[in-house]
Amino acid sequence: SNVFFRPIEKINAVIESYPKGIAGFKRYLEVIDTEPDIADKPDAVEVGTLRGDISFSKVSFGYEDDRKVLEDISLSVNAGETIAFVGPSGAGKTTICSLLPRFYDVTGGAISIDGIDIRDMKLSSLRKQIGIVQQDVFLFSGTIRENIAYGKLDAELPEIWQAARQARLEELINSLPKGMDTVIGERGVKLSGGQKQRLAIARMFLKNPPILILDEATSALDTETEAAIQQSLADLSVGRTTLVIAHRLTTIKNADRIVVVSEDGISEEGRHEELVNAGGTYSRLYQAQYNA
Ligand code: ATP
């Protein structure tokens, strides 16, 4: 299950009724921002741009009071590092990642970024530091420009173009009759799955957060598109702390570290070759999944 759908659903519900244009949309976002599900402490601090050193310290969490999903999880991620979470379905990979933007608060232990407990940060300033890319790209009916600018609502055209180039969308945009001002969505040009992914990646280049969470697609695009998207995501993750909920072997193999999440917590950590040679859970998962 994907807990990231919750906030997205909330935004989607709002989009249904937003007045035309980005200005109206922006007002709604501000309304959402003032009513978070999790409240700021009275003395919460506004954090500037963080480096992105993340620490989970004896973290416990359950969606319901009587059932813990995570118990005593400890994990340090260095700024700029790419971590791939792997493990059986339901083990808690998505849950670990959803605690970082505080979609839920831990019930035990603490999570800190650059040594600051995330519960001591203003929620809005915490979430500015984190970009989430998931398989279901959220687009609204509007122009390409507006859809990319969703990553940074006050962005100027040159930086929107810059992000489009970084996500390798330039050629597509230039081939469209109205370029950046082409309307996409129900009343406009339909984008392919791969093009939507690129648009989401362009948003993230524009938002430029030090921390990224990538929820990898389980259902495949065609192989060529897949490889190209993987390359763009790799470009995006350079210099950012990246947590990947991983399903793809290429991502897993190229990660700085693989973290195996099992029913009883983190069971193994290391690079691909190390874990294969160790002959533990990862090597069994790897063999079962890829027949290697
Ligand atoms: P998958 O690979 O299938 O996405 P996962 O390792 O990411 O699995 P989670 O989605 O984190 O696992 O789920 C961990 C546990 O928490 C599962 O038992 C799941 O049923 C439960 N869970 C997840 N989301 C919720 C929720 N919103 N409410 C209640 N329980 C949930």
Image: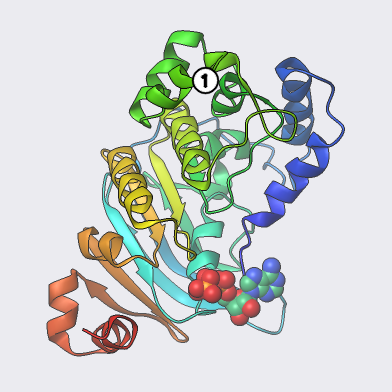
State the residue at coordinates (29%, 67%): 249
Q: Could you tell whether 238 is left or right of 222 in the image?
A: left
Q: Secondary structure at mark 1?
A: loop
Tell me the quadrant of the picture where the N terminus can be found. bottom right
Q: Is any part of residue 62 visible from this angle?
A: no
**Among the 4 quarters of the image, the one containing residue 148:** top right
In this view, the residue in front, 44 or 194, is 194
- Report the residue that reaches farthest toward the right: 17
Q: Mark 1: give few (<14), some (14-19) or many (20+) Cα within 10 Å.
A: few
- Residue located beneath label 1 in the image: 176
**Among the 4 quarters of the image, the one containing residue 14:** top right
State the residue at coordinates (49%, 64%): 219
Q: Residue 38 in the image: state x and y as whole percent.
A: 71, 49
State the residue at coordinates (55%, 58%): 99
Identity of the amino acid at label 1? Leu
Q: Residue 32 in the image: state x and y as whole percent.
A: 76, 35
In this view, the residue in front, 235 or 81, is 235
Q: Residue 67 in the image: state x and y as whole percent.
A: 66, 83
